[in-house]
Image (cartoon, rainbow, N blue to C red):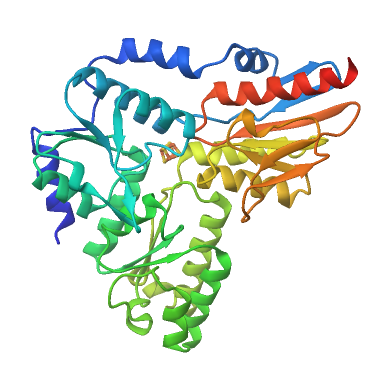
Amino acid sequence: MDTKAFKRSLQQSDNYHRKGFGHEAEVAGTMNTEYQSNLIQTIRDRNYRLQRGNVTIFLAEAFGFCWGVERAVAMAYETRQHFPKERIWITNEIIHNPSVNQRLREMNVGFISVIEGVKDFSVVGSGDVVILPAFGASVTEMQLLKDKNCTIVDTTCPWVSKVWNSVEKHKKRNYTSIIHGKYAHEETVATSSFADRYLVVLNLEQAKYVTNYILNGGDKDEFLAKFANAYSAGFAPDRDLERVGIANQTTMLKSETEAIGKLLEQTMLQKYGPTELNDHFMSFNTICDATQERQDAMLDLVKEDLSLMIVIGGFNSSNTTHLQEIAIEHNIPSYHIDSAERIISRQSIEHKPLGQEITVTDHWLPEGKITVGVTSGASTPDKVVADAIEKIFELKASAIA
Ligand code: SF4
């Protein structure tokens, strides 16, 4: 399919919107009331630190809502205002944040349900309004909605579109897209739908396996089994790894995306030599600023002498998980929670350890004076962060009382 021509024709259609509807001012007011927090503003004003009783909070200097997410949520609110009577759907969670998605449900925005791994679009009728989330939607989904004559409100973050453009360039010049991401993540599903040939690698270890195959060959069946579900139909490693371009899920760990890019570049250099490198390797800078800033701020935060770290964000949020990885690498006890309610008491916290199921840990809050690092993923409103901080203050104060 000519995905570029399809996108062009979609964008020219009267039923397609990727800018707001002129209700920015009203929506900004509502969003401030619902998602902003005075406590967070105070902490920002005090150089990202706040001491109360025997607790000192160290807040990351970049955290929470990124502009792409804020833009997507604002567009969803505007859509409701602009189409007060129409049925409105979202093809997925607009962002990975339970409180934001709950708020949209209250505004009578429906979520397309997933039945046995497949989205059920049968509920969507001609003339309905459908919002595409910040991390985008696959070409097949967009085509289906266009064919149903829906009004499409596309909130895809421009950074994600930038990755799609890179993939289009790979395709045009006959390169296989090597996508650093999680193959089942909605953003990567969307990105790969623009590629003719692709392979998704999760981490540096998988990338090393691929580069070893490029240099030394290997067992094709083992390769295909290892990357099951993570490559395009008919992928043949011996043929399709001769010319590769790099793309990424925008929320992956920046240092890892860079390391994977470098590794593939060096591999192609070693195999084909400097004069032919450009015929075998292609890379564009598509690492999102917001992800990078949050990760850099986290790297600064872990330099502090912290008793523990609270990482707040949806449990299926990639960028939040990566923030937690940084805490773990620095041996700081860290708790990934998605709302203040997970902080059950002074004794117990319900949280999601990296790569594990949600669990309850006891004796998580140390006695006496403590320093607590706090950060949150790109889809977490300030208010959720403030609630968690207040809860910690309260629990520690009640220990003294
Ligand atoms: S994290 Fe980056 S790519 Fe994702 S929505 Fe935010 S600004 Fe866009």
Residue at 13% over, 38% down: 150
* Residue 267, position as x, y percentages in the image: 49, 74
Residue 150, compared with residue 39, is above or below; it is below
* Residue 283, position as x, y percentages in the image: 40, 58
* Residue 375, position as x, y percentages in the image: 63, 33
Answer with the quarter of the image where residue 259 lies: bottom right
Answer with left or right where residue 277 lies relative to residue 252: left
Residue 220, compared with residue 377, is above or below; it is below
Residue at 15% over, 50% down: 143
Residue at 62% over, 43% down: 323
Answer with left or right where residue 127 lies relative to residue 157: left
| Closest to the observer, 37 or 256 | 37
* Residue 316, position as x, y percentages in the image: 50, 46
Answer with left or right where residue 71 lies relative to residue 131: right
Residue 43, compared with residue 222, is above or below; it is above
Q: Can residue 48 be seen from the camera position used here? A: no
Q: Quadrant of the C terminus?
A: top right
| Closest to the observer, 42 or 119 | 119
